[in-house]
Every structure is written in C-alpha cells, then in structure tokens.
Image (cartoon, rainbow, N blue to C red):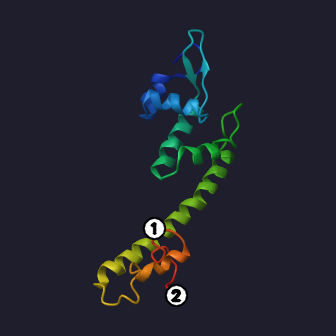
Amino acid sequence: MAAKKGFLIGKVAARTGIAVSAIRHYEDIGLIRSERNAGGQRVFLASDIRRISFIIIAQNLGFTLAQIKQQFDGLPDNRTPTKKDWARISSSFGREIDDRIAALTLMREKLTSCIGCGCLSLKSCALYNAEDRASRLGPGPRYLLGDKPA
C-alpha cells in the first residue's frame, strides 16, 4: 500500500495476474484511472481491481476492449461503481452473451448434422453452394448462419 490510500501498480498486477504494461494500457485508453502519490507513483483503488477483473472475464468471453470501454463509459468516475451499476453492465453483456450462445448452438447443430450426413444429399447440404448462389444473401457461410437455399 502507498501513503495515499490505494494500491501501487505492482500490487494491482500481482492481484489481477495482469502485466504492469497492460494496466498502463488500460489506463491510457480510459478503462481505469489512477492518481499519483507524493512520490509520483500510480495509485489505484480497489474498484480498479474489480474493473480489471471484469476486463479479464469479458475478454475471455470474446469482447473487445472497445466494447468493454463502451460499457465502462457509463460507470461513475468519482465513486466506486455500485451493485446496480454492475447489474446494468451485466444485463447489457448478458443479452449479447445469450445471442452468442444461440449462434454457437446453431453452429454446433449444423456442423454435427453436416459431419454426420456423409454428403448424401447435396440439395440439403448447409455447406454446398452451387454457383455461389448464397452470395446474394451476404458474405460468409450463409446457409450455416441460418439462411435457407432458394
């Protein structure tokens, strides 16, 4: 602990398992804030450790730092976020997580049936795209994403 109430950057790094350079980067892009003690060292609050923990979890779920920052921009800078503040972020991310789960479930089902089919029927194959007809529906593997062949 520093003379100023809070945690020095090395302690935050040890507590979160994140490199000091990553913590500095998070600060540079506005995900967390520090103050300086009398010696000029960065001092972080316990709420910054919670924010970093959330960043780690969100990144592991595939969210970008930009998406995380967008959520953090609604958090107060002048006080520790409350349970209600975190619930709002959780709700917002929860909807996207639910959408991702649904998309992954659909992908798993389609791939399972595709791998198991042995391509006995190209008329119903989700990967078969004769003459690139699926391109009119947009980019990517349209049939695997849920579009139906015409």
Please state the horizontal and vertical placement of residue 39, each as a whole percent of the image.
56, 9
Residue nearer the viewer, 147 or 25: 147
* Residue 111 place in picture, x, y as percent: 37, 75
Q: Quadrant of residue 104?
A: bottom left
Whether residue 21 sits left or right of residue 36 in the image: it is: left
Q: Which residue is outermost to the top?
A: 39
Kind of residue at badge 1: Leu
Q: Is 131 on the left or on the right of 38, as rendered?
A: left
Q: Name the secondary structure under disc 1.
A: helix
Give the camera-side residue of 149 and 38: 149
| Foreground pick, 75 / 45 | 75
Circle 2 SS class: loop
Q: Which residue is mark 1?
A: 104
> Circle 2 sits on which residue?
150
Please report the residue visible at 48 percent of the width from the left and 52 percent of the height from the top.
Answer: 62
Task: Name the amino acid type tagged 2.
Answer: Ala
Q: Is residue 129 above or below residue 54?
A: below
Q: Which mark is residue 121?
A: none
Q: Nearer the viewer, mark 1 or mark 2?
A: 2
If you read the primary sequence from the N terminus, does the residue marked by circle 1 or circle 2 appear first? 1
Work out which residue is located at the far front of the displayed protein and give it: 131
Instruction: Name above or below for residue 1 compared with residue 49.
Output: above
Q: How many marks?
A: 2
